[in-house]
Image (tube, helix red, strand yellow):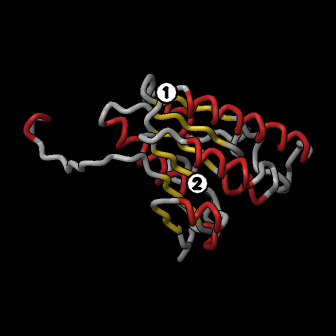
Amino acid sequence: MERSKRRFIETKEKPGLVVVMTGPGKGKTTAALGIALRAIGYDMKVCIIEFLKGDMHSGEIDGTKRLYPNLELHITGKGFCGIKGDKYSFEKHRSNAQDAIKLAKEKMLSGKFDVMILDEIHNAVELKLIDLPQVIELIDIKPLLMHLILTGRNAHAEIIKRAHTVTEMKEIKHAYQQGIKPQKGIDY
């Protein structure tokens, strides 16, 4: 069907939403990437800032490059903080997360983006790499029409309270419980 003949849902007010993807289950980043893909389908501009996944290669890194110039990806983390094999100090992780907050604010206020995704930001708060007031400030200064997507486990109650939409991913069953290693293109 031609784009001009498609029906679209139109609303009188179109405020930018604050969307939280949280919970212990798989799919928070994947859901956020789905929003990015949908937005790009409408020629919207998307900025993704990854707070923790920095030193792990993932298909989403190469996949998002194909969506340029509508999507800009910034990998700011040094990998998951405090897990086995973590080769960076807490101070280094915190420094990188603080740089990510500054970058998020800069990109948010640039006027260039319709959607901002802050991936694993809830984890960064829980790990004390960033402070809750810093995230609240981003929500408060978000441009009126920008959509802000916040992902990660254990979203803080104050962030949930301020969000328009909150989805909790609940793990029912996972392949790793059956001894199946992470699968390329599905898990990373």
Q: Secondary structure at mark 1?
A: loop
Sooner in the amino-acid sequence: mark 2 or mark 1: 1
Instruction: Give the side of residue 28 with respect to residue 35, left or right.
Output: right
Q: Quick one: quadrant of the N terminus?
A: top left
Residue type, label 2:
Thr
Name the residue furthest top. 69
How far across and how far down the image is residue 37, in percent? 39, 41
Residue behind mark 2: 151
Could you say which quadrant of the image residue 55 lies in? top right
How far across and how far down the image is residue 165, in percent? 45, 61
Foreground: disc 2 or disc 1: 1
Residue at 44% over, 22% down: 69
Q: Secondary structure at mark 2?
A: strand
Q: Is residue 81 depicted above or below 157 in this figure?
A: above
Residue at 31% over, 36% down: 41
Q: CA distance from mark 2 to mark 1?
A: 22 Å
How far across and how far down the image is residue 3, in percent? 14, 35
Q: Is residue 86 depicted above or below 47 in this figure?
A: below
Badge 1 density bin: few <14, some 14–19, many ≥20, Cα 10 Å: few
Residue type, label 1:
Gly
Residue behind mark 1: 111
Residue at 55% over, 48% down: 184
Q: Name the disc covering residue 172, or none.
A: none
Of residues 133 and 78, which is closer to you in this image? 133
Instruction: Give the side of residue 133 with respect to residue 128, left or right.
Output: left
How far across and how far down the image is residue 18, in percent? 49, 53
Q: How many marks?
A: 2
Q: Is residue 17 depicted above or below 155 in this figure?
A: above
